[in-house]
Amino acid sequence: MAQCITCGSELHPDRAEKYNYCMAPECQEKNLQGLTMVAIGVNKSAEQYLLLDEQTRDELATGKFADQRRGSFGTSVPSEAGTTTVKPTRVQPARRRRAASRPAAPRRPWTKSQEKLALLYNEQGKRPEEIAQKLGLSRYTVTQIILTSRNQGKL
């Protein structure tokens, strides 16, 4: 049975696989060592960190985690053997739209008569909720009618 190197108490077999000290606060304080982390992939969406152990150190030395972007950006340093580079991908040109003979008018989900009535009710001081109820429209639509007319200088 494994024993703690600090106090001599017995270690649980699962703990003894990785540690040679027990969970007592004095033993942990004396034997606890910090971990060294290394950032291997940092980009816009996520950061990837690994615990720096012998295996990770060897993988770093072989170039497993080499910056794949370097080859495509034309750096002055030639890529070393064993490093991977990304081949530049071909970007397809954007499709062109045919120019319309005249710009399309914005589509409005209300009629001219609904617009006139909504503006009259608005001038009378009614709220959009009340106007919407009278005309059978949504409050959003009534608000859009009022804002559109303000932007066009009708109000």
Image: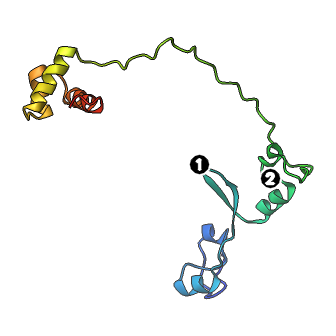
In front of the other: 30 or 96? 96
Quadrant where the N terminus sits is bottom right
Q: Is residue 40 left or right of residue 136?
A: right
Q: Which residue is drawn at 69% across and 70% down?
A: 36
Please indicate whether residue 91 sits to the left or right of residue 155 in the image.
right
* Residue in the foreground of this view, choosing between 67 and 110: 110
Q: Can you say whether 8 is above or below 45 in the image?
A: below
What type is the residue that disc 1 sits on? Answer: Ser
Residue 152 x %, y %: 29, 29
User: Picture coordinates of residue 23 (x, y %)?
Assistant: 55, 78
Gap in angstroms between the C-alphas marked 1 and 2: 18 Å
Q: Where is residue 19 in the image (x, y as percent from the top left)?
A: 66, 74
At numbered mark 1, what does the secondary structure look like: helix, strand or loop? loop
Callout 1: few (<14), some (14-19), or many (20+) C-alpha neighbours within 10 Å?
few
| Extreme residue toward the top, this view | 101
Q: Mark 2 points at which residue?
A: 66
Residue at image x 8%, y 33%?
126
Q: Mark 1 points at which residue?
A: 45
Pinpoint residue 113: horizontal percent, then vertical percent: 17, 15
Q: What residue type is labelled 2?
A: Ala
Is residue 148 toward the left or the right of residue 139 in the image?
right
Pick the front one: 126 or 129 = 126
Crowd class of label 2 (few under 14; some 14 to 19; many from 20; radius 10 Å) = some
Q: Which residue is drawn at 22% across and 31% down?
A: 143
**Total numbered labels placed on residues in the image:** 2
Q: Which mark is residue 31?
A: none
Q: Please report the residue visible at 20 percent of the width from the left and 31 percent of the height from the top.
A: 155
Q: How is the image coloured?
A: rainbow
Who comes first in sequence, dot 1 or dot 2? 1
* Mark 2 residue element: loop
